[in-house]
Amino acid sequence: MERARRYHRPLYRIRLAEMALGLLVPLALVLAQVDDELSPAWWLEVLVLTALVVAATALARLPLAVWRFRHERAWGFSTQTVRSWIADRLKALAIGVVLTGVAFVGLVGAARAFPRWWPLIAAVAAAALVALLTFVAPVLLEPVFNRFRPLDDKRLADELRALADRAGVPIRDVLVADASRRTTKSNAYVSGLGRTRRVVLWDTLLERAGEPELKTVVAHELGHRRFQHVAVGTLLAMAGAAGAVLLLWALADDPGDPGIVPFAVFLFTALELASVPFLAVLSRRFERAADRFSLDLTGNPEAYERLHAELARENMADLDPPRAFHLALHSHPTPDERIAAGRAWKRKGAVPV
Ligand SMILES: [Zn+2]
């Protein structure tokens, strides 16, 4: 616990500083009024301004990112070379510039083409873009950073498929991501919608966890699918994106002016930050539901407890995070909260499904 505290406390400060910079850099660009005739065509000016805001924010955060990378290496978690780390940053920056740029060309373009109806059109388009991104992310964005392969242990793959059938959420494949090229930490997740839905295990987890623990992990991820957590999260994000556009409509003088971009980024980032504590509460609720589901499905509270204890040790989880920080920002309950829930489940003698 003492080591985890020394590892995590500076990371909490870094996270807060990153959030603050995400707000302060666009604000500085609003105040500097960098909108005067940077380029002849309005859409080019939108793209230039978007690239400027996104790149300036990344640049301001760079010292923090370097510090974080050195911290992860010093604690033995990062397995990345400097070169591969730089490639990651550049890829993320390029994706950020392109996606934000396209979104803002659409927004400003709608305001220019439909001065009366643009808020409605842009709100619907923003919600549609969020849904589209969730749908394509597993096949277009995630492969930019990781390679995925089907689980090659046929027997284990069959068992996990049988588990998914019993859970009522059949899956084609459990995919394995080459997380070990960046970190020694272990994890698993679900992503995608409809045809792109998938359960992904990090290769680090696959290598170290025993079979009962792996089944518990997969059962947890199946719980997320069974309860449609990705779909619910996507719907919320869609509503948030549409609401953000409507708020911009209420606040902006001339949304058809490319100079709106820094203010819009500032506004959207502020709304995103304001939503984080609510999403953290919702996410922890989802995690508790998925944990309960994993216990119901496997009926193996011993494997559940071993899994969460091992994950906490391997990832050096903070068992005692600052309370306010945890409640406002953390997406998962702490490991001891999860283990306590498993023991409570066992005491109640819940019947496996
Ligand atoms: Zn989860």
Image: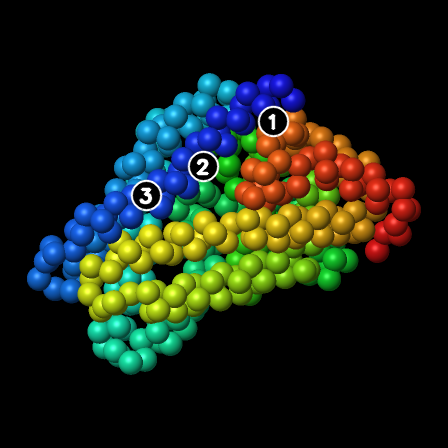
Q: Nearer the viewer, residue 135 or 152?
A: 135
Tell me the CA gap for discs 2 and 3: 12 Å
Q: Amino acid at mark 1?
A: Met
Horizontal and vertical percent for residue 316?
A: 60, 26
Which picture quadrant has residue 156?
top right
Q: Which residue is mark 2?
A: 16
Decide if residue 325 is on the left or right side of residue 50.
right
Q: Earlier in the sequence, mark 2 or mark 3?
A: 2
Foreground label between 1 and 3: 3
Residue 129 seen in render: no
Q: Position of residue 75 (x, y in %)?
A: 51, 20
Q: Secondary structure at mark 1?
A: loop
- Secondary structure beneath label 2: helix
Q: Is mark 1 within 8 Å of ligand 1?
A: no
Residue in the foreground of this view, choosing between 250 and 115? 250
Residue labelled with disc 1: 316
Q: Are marks 2 and 1 in contact (CB under 8 Å)?
A: no
For disc 3, the neighbor class at 10 Å (few under 14, some 14 to 19, many from 20) is: some
Whichever of labels 2 and 1 marks the residue nearer the N terminus, that label is: 2
Q: Which residue is mark 3?
A: 24
- Identified by mark 3, the residue type is Leu
